[in-house]
Image: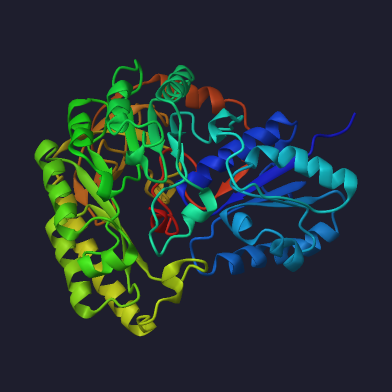
Amino acid sequence: MSTARTYEVRTYGCQMNVHDSERLSGLLEDAGYLAVPEGEQADVVVFNTCAVRENADNKLYGNLGHLAPIKAATPGMQIAVGGCLAQKDRSTITQKAPWVDVVFGTHNIGSLPALLERARVQEEAQVEILESLEVFPSTLPTRRESAYAAWVSVSVGCNNTCTFCIVPSLRGKEKDRRPGEILAEIEALVAEGVSEITLLGQNVNSYGVEFGDRQAFSKLLRSCGSIPGLERVRFTSPHPAEFTDDVIEAMAETPNVMPQLHMPLQSGSDKVLREMRRSYRQKKYLGIIERVRAAMPDAAITTDIIVGFPGETEEDFAETLHVVREARFSGAFTFQYSKRPGTPAAVLEDQVPPEVVKDRYERLAALVNEIAWEENKRLVGRRVELMVAEGEGRKDAATHRLSGRGPDNRLVHFAPPADVSVRPGDMVTVEITYAAPHHLVADTFVSARRTRSGDAWEARTSAPTPAGVTLGMPTVGVPAPLPDAPACR
């Protein structure tokens, strides 16, 4: 009797890649592979790549080079490369790393098991890159990383043409799922114990463009409100140009839609936004923030900002600082502009000197942290209901605390009494006692509520199972975007 082959998925990039990796893991397990036990070498290593950052290829080839001698010494080992970089570089990967067995793109992740088998039988590399979506990823088998929180794709692809972003050329035009399919998936997840879902799309609030319903996303949010057992609904990431008042109303009027919004700004300068081909301006962006706060006073708003876009002047940068002060973000993912090969911005003249970009980045980060800290201090003394999380508090073991997320998605560390047992997925009510720029601490414990999600987590962990997906972000719960992710929005 032959031993089942093991696999490992290494993921880089945005939430879409993270969700794709859950699909890849499900496909491999459906084909008979087992997740590799921690600390062991997998028979199949899959890289799910990102092409957003300038050095993405250097990172990939460095990792592939590290695996080359291991593969040479391990008969039958296979390496596969998929995702956005594979879609972009295609046959270049096997030229630079001839020990790679399979290269597949963003449109055909469902082909991975067949390509691995074909490469094994034919003893030669298999490269298959499709130009359009073969099967909507949500129809594929899935190995969810969390028992209590899940990603649910509403669309794939993007119809925007931001000059710094390569995603539309790699993911294709937007393809929308039908509302009934999305709601059916959510209901199935809830039946399995999930109580928090995050609706996912490259431009999530343009959902419905393919079938001609401009209010499809707000209707979808309201429909989520009628699903029994679904306690929390989030979404990422919307585009300010298409953020309409019906979405704000749906957020405010649907109890299980959380008062949290991640809305990329990228720049506060109208001139830079025009060069970025972002079809909104500072006034419109701040107007959205104002209306969101009027409807949901306690909403936490986060954003993405790029510093040093070609042609950005000190006056342009001052406009970005102005928006940060006015919007009072609870957090921001801030990035120094780097060239994305294949994007219009990569060949623009008037590139900003690196030392200037670094200085602006440091000033922006300092202001963002200052405001986030001030906003967090306002919560001291307030009672908050948290969903207990797993793996989000890096110092929990040392501090003897647990961690959870509030309705606004702020991370809170807390210490339950010794006689109270809480599990990831359970709900606790605590009182905030301390604030830092990026987290809160609650040393006053009020109550705990055991949930079906906690039951699901307990059932999943009662028998040890190896982790098969290595992600570049927290693997459980609803993680924050990676540094590479915001440029895709």
Q: Point out residue 362 in the picture as x, y percentages from the top left corner.
A: 29, 73
Vertical arrangement, residue 69 with respect to residue 467, above or below: below
Which of the image's four quarters has the N terminus? top right
Instruction: Write the residue at 57% across / 28% down.
Output: 139
| Left or right: where 322 falls relative to 154 | left
The reply to whether residue 338 is visible in this rendering is no
Q: How many marks?
A: 0
Q: How is the image coloured?
A: rainbow
The outermost residue toward the front is: 212
Q: Point out residue 291 in the picture as x, y percentages from the top left corner.
A: 12, 43
| Left or right: where 244 falls relative to 8 | left
Q: Point out residue 424 in the picture as x, y percentages from the top left corner.
A: 42, 32
Instruction: Write the residue at 36% across / 33% down.
Output: 208
> Foreground residue, 130 or 44?
130
Vertical arrangement, residue 89 with respect to residue 300, above or below: below
> Foreground residue, 282 or 70?
282
The reply to whether residue 144 is visible in this rendering is yes
Q: Point out residue 174 in the picture as x, y percentages from the top left corner.
A: 45, 42
| Left or right: where 466 falls relative to 425 | right
The outermost residue toward the left is: 294
Instruction: Write the residue at 31% across / 82% down.
Output: 356
Instruction: Write the residue at 30% across / 58% down.
Output: 278
| Left or right: where 154 falls relative to 303 | right
> Foreground residue, 403 or 411?
411
